[in-house]
Image: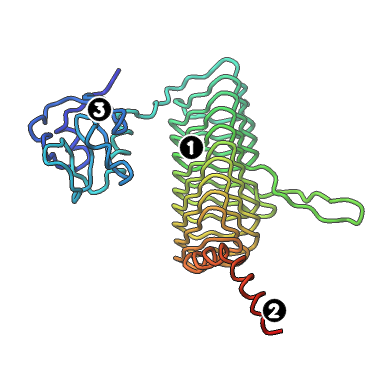
Amino acid sequence: MLKTLSLAQVADLIDGKLDGDAIHSANKLVQGINTLKGSDENNISFLANKRYQDDLQSTQAAAVLVALNAKVDEHLPVIRVDDPYLAFAFLQRFFHPDLIATGKRHASAVIDDSATLAHDVDIAAGVVVGANVVIGSGTRIGASCVIGDDVQIGSDCLLHPKTVIANSCILGNEVLLQSGAIIGSDGFGYAWSGTKHLKIPQVGRVILEDDVEIGANSCIDRGAIGDTVIERGVKLDNQIQIGHNVRIGAYSIMASQVGISGSTHIGSGCQFGGQAGLAGHIKVGAGVKLAAKSGVMSDLEAGGIYAGAPAMPHRLWLKVSALTAKLPEIWKAQRNNIKHKT
């Protein structure tokens, strides 16, 4: 059943203020959010990126979420808010709420007798739950997930289909795993014996604290000795590799294909662009921002913005990049200068 809100109720929900023609249509009902181009009179839209400014003139949306100081046509129906993108997120969650677990258990699921599941945990088809597993209230387990022995999963978690949680790993509350995520795979640890690579048993765990999200087909390796820890509120995109004994600080966020080698420690509130790669056994301070494809070989100071491979301060990287394009010209001039002197 579609949810509806009046424009006045929308403004109340997101602490916004009706402006323009929206003032005269406060009772207008809307049923969801869409892009500026895709909206009709039943939708709210939003402007969070100046690239889409021109679409304001043609949008059919009932109202548009804009910043408090945004300059728009005085007749355009708008709702002014502190942060249009954050307001969009709140409304999207209202119109598309999470499903609520009700305790459904598919007959094909295999649940060890020693497992302890809250009464309202949902278990879909083909799920395997190992010995001594504990799963908290409100958690939903998607089809074909595998949960190893001695795993602990908190309340209100969501495991999308075909995720794997290996033995002894711990998930806090409100953890979300996208399809194909593997938590607790063996760390990449070998010693050369002189004749072959001798595998080192990986006996640590992975701990995902509350409100962590792991993207599709991402792998978090268990510690070799001790634990790999992903702290509260961390968000990892798809196809990310986290090595053994890595620690990622609270509320850090990383785009697709980031790779972090073993025993590296990341501070809180860091932001990494896609395909950034980090060597092992280094420390990255809190609040560091890494541009896409950065290669980090050594420690980085807190609060810095870095780019390039090897990673360097962003301003220096801009200068280096500008010079790189001019190297053939510089070399030609230098070579001619040498010839002239000789």
Q: Position of residue 207 (x, y in %)?
A: 56, 47
Disc 3 versus disc 2: distance between alpha carbons?
A: 70 Å
SS at mark 1 in the image: strand
Q: Nearer the viewer, mark 1 or mark 3?
A: 3
Q: Nearer the viewer, mark 3 or mark 2?
A: 2
Q: Quadrant of residue 329?
A: bottom right
Q: Residue at x 63, y 70 (%)?
A: 332
The residue most toward the bottom is 341
Q: Residue at x 65, y 52 (%)?
A: 244
Classify mark 3: residues with Cα within 10 Å, few (<14), some (14-19) or many (20+): many
SS at mark 3 in the image: strand
The answer to whether residue 173 is above or below residue 331 is above
Residue 262 relative to residue 1: left or right? right
**Marks 2 and 1 in Cβ contact (< 8 Å):** no
Q: Amino acid at mark 2?
A: Lys
Which residue is denoted by mark 1 in the rendering?
A: 176
Which quarter of the rendering shows the N terminus? Answer: top left
**Marks 1 and 3 in Cβ contact (< 8 Å):** no
Which residue is denoted by mark 3 in the rendering?
A: 43
Q: Position of residue 156 (x, y in %)?
A: 43, 34
Image disc number at residue 253: none
- Marked residue nearer the N-terminal end (2 or 1): 1
Q: Amino acid at mark 3?
A: Asn
Residue 310 relative to residue 137: left or right? right
Classify mark 2: residues with Cα within 10 Å, few (<14), some (14-19) or many (20+): few
Disc 1 versus disc 3: distance between alpha carbons?
A: 29 Å
Classify mark 1: residues with Cα within 10 Å, few (<14), some (14-19) or many (20+): many
SS at mark 2 in the image: helix
Image disc number at residue 339: 2
Disc 2 versus disc 1: distance between alpha carbons?
A: 65 Å
The answer to whether residue 217 is above or below residue 220 is above
The residue most toward the right is 195
